[in-house]
Amino acid sequence: MRKSPASNSAQVPQIGEAMRGEDGHLPYLLSQAQAAMRLALERALADLGVTPPQFSILTMIDSYPGLSGADLARLAMLTPQTVNLIVRNLERDGLIAKSPDDMHGRILRLQTTAAGHALRTKCRERASRVDKRVIAGLAASEEKVVRRWLVRLAKDMRPNA
């Protein structure tokens, strides 16, 4: 594959410029911000050997013990196959455990182990630093507006909303 001439790359706007700035399409701007935050979180968690999706799933299981894989997929807005792979890896590493549901033996309930809870706590400390970078420069009232808007957007954009 041929490389583009250097002169073409000079025409690509930086984040915050042209359509990558305030005049850009909102879905693109949200995606751009999410990608930057995900990269920051990946870097923050890297030496712990945890990916952002693993951290997310571990957090949900730790926060809501007893979820099934299907519950977790809906909550995380991921495919059941993706959640199954993450759960399998977390279980292999001794971070979560499965137990049969009392009423429906085929349903497996998930909970964190002591090691999983401890790792989630370490990850949360790192993620908090990323959170602080995200809201840096916002007044508390502005942060509240952003949070409300993001929650409303997530609710309104659900498939059956």
Image (cartoon, rainbow, N blue to C red):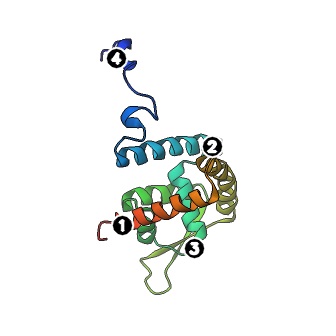
Residue appearing at x 43%, y 76% in the figure? 107
**Badge 3: how crowded within 10 Å, few (<14), some, or many (20+)?**
few
- Kindly tell me whether residue 59 is visible in this rendering: yes
Depth check: give the residue in front, 66 or 157. 157
Residue 25 rendering spot, x and y as whole percentages: 34, 44
Cα separation, mark 2 vs mark 4, equals: 33 Å
Q: Badge 1 is on which residue?
A: 156
Depth check: give the residue in front, 86 or 27. 27
Label located before the other in sequence (4 or 3): 4
Depth check: give the residue in front, 79 or 25. 25
Label located before the other in sequence (1 or 2): 2
Label located before the other in sequence (2 or 4): 4
Residue 69 rendering spot, x and y as whole percentages: 44, 68
Q: Which mark is residue 65?
A: 3
**Badge 2: how crowded within 10 Å, few (<14), some, or many (20+)?**
many
Residue appearing at x 56%, y 55% in the figure? 55
Q: Nearer the viewer, mark 3 or mark 1?
A: 1
Residue appearing at x 40%, y 36% in the figure? 20
The type of residue carrying mark 2 is Ala
The type of residue carrying mark 3 is Pro
Give left or right: position of 62 versus 86: right
Q: Badge 2 is on which residue?
A: 44
Residue 150 rendering spot, x and y as whole percentages: 46, 60
Q: Please, what secondary structure does the residue beneath circle 1 have?
A: helix
Q: Badge 4 is on which residue?
A: 8
Q: Nearer the viewer, mark 1 or mark 2?
A: 1
Q: Please, what secondary structure does the residue beneath circle 2 have?
A: helix
Label located before the other in sequence (2 or 3): 2
**Badge 4: how crowded within 10 Å, few (<14), some, or many (20+)?**
few
